[in-house]
Amino acid sequence: MTTNFDELLERFHATLATFDDALVRNEVARIGWAMPARPLDPRPLACLRQLDRIVELAPANAQPLARLLAERRRQLRWGQTYSEADFGKTFIDNYGWLEVFGTRGHFVNDEVAAGLLILGPEIVYPDHHHVAEEIYIPLTGGTEWRMGEGDFGRREAGEVIHHASDVSHAMRTGKEPLLALYLWRGGPLAAKSTITGSVSQGRN
């Protein structure tokens, strides 16, 4: 069965347009939004159980996108860059991403990749870096983020987080799951990150 994913791209675009931030506005303006669709088989993951709670947590501007993800979770192609051998079963069962567009997403784009990341509660995504420049916008609050050698700091829904090329960064969730929107540009769009931090899960 062929599913029309135009609404996914439209809601993703509409959600991005709600953020009054120069970095985001400039990036959105650079993207050619008339992208051809790519036929992909669905791939549900264990982390999708978090979407019901994510819908409850998401602010009003992210609600349409969060609800679509929850309603169509089993129709979408979810991915994982890492394996159980990398970070362990707890991480893998609470981690996944959906590439809306890019070199492997539901829509074809060879210049920029964009999508959504899910992390379950009490999960550490250890320090890592990659060549591509990255913009993150958490759509749920309460997750702690770290960049470079700095300390972890709590970020709320709607804050724009910018990682320059090869800058180390990490995230750790608290009692609630994370849904974050991401944009990648300026490097290999499907590259596995270089991990530099501890892979142990939970808070110390």
Image (cartoon, helix red, strand yellow):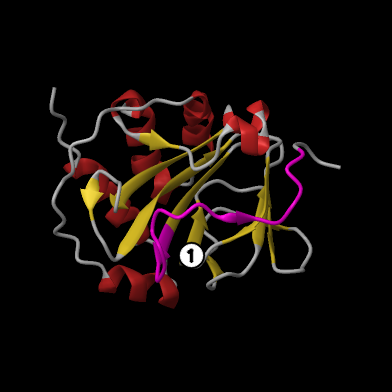
At 65% from the left edge and 61% from the top edge, which residue is drawn? 169
Please state, as top left, top right, bottom left or bottom right, where the C terminus lies in the image.
Answer: top right
At 15% from the left edge and 35% from the top edge, which residue is drawn? 4
Q: Is 187 a magenta residue?
A: yes
Is 182 positioned to the left or the right of 142 in the image? Answer: left
Q: Which residue is mark 1?
A: 134
Q: Which residues are magenta?
A: 183-200
Q: Is 24 a magenta residue?
A: no
Magenta-highlighted stretch: main secondary structure? loop
Position in image of residue 10 (x %, y %): 23, 50
Question: Where is 136 relative to 166, above or below?
Answer: above
Is 150 positioned to the left or the right of 167 in the image? Answer: right
Position in image of residue 154 (x %, y %): 70, 56
Question: Quarter of the image holding residue 32?
Answer: bottom left
Can see residue 68? yes
Q: Nearer the viewer, residue 155 or 2?
A: 2
At 49% from the left edge and 43% from the top edge, which residue is drawn? 81
Question: Where is 75 relative to 66, above or below?
Answer: above
Can see residue 143? no
Please state, as top left, top right, bottom left or bottom right, where the N terminus lies in the image.
Answer: top left
Q: Secondary structure at mark 1?
A: strand
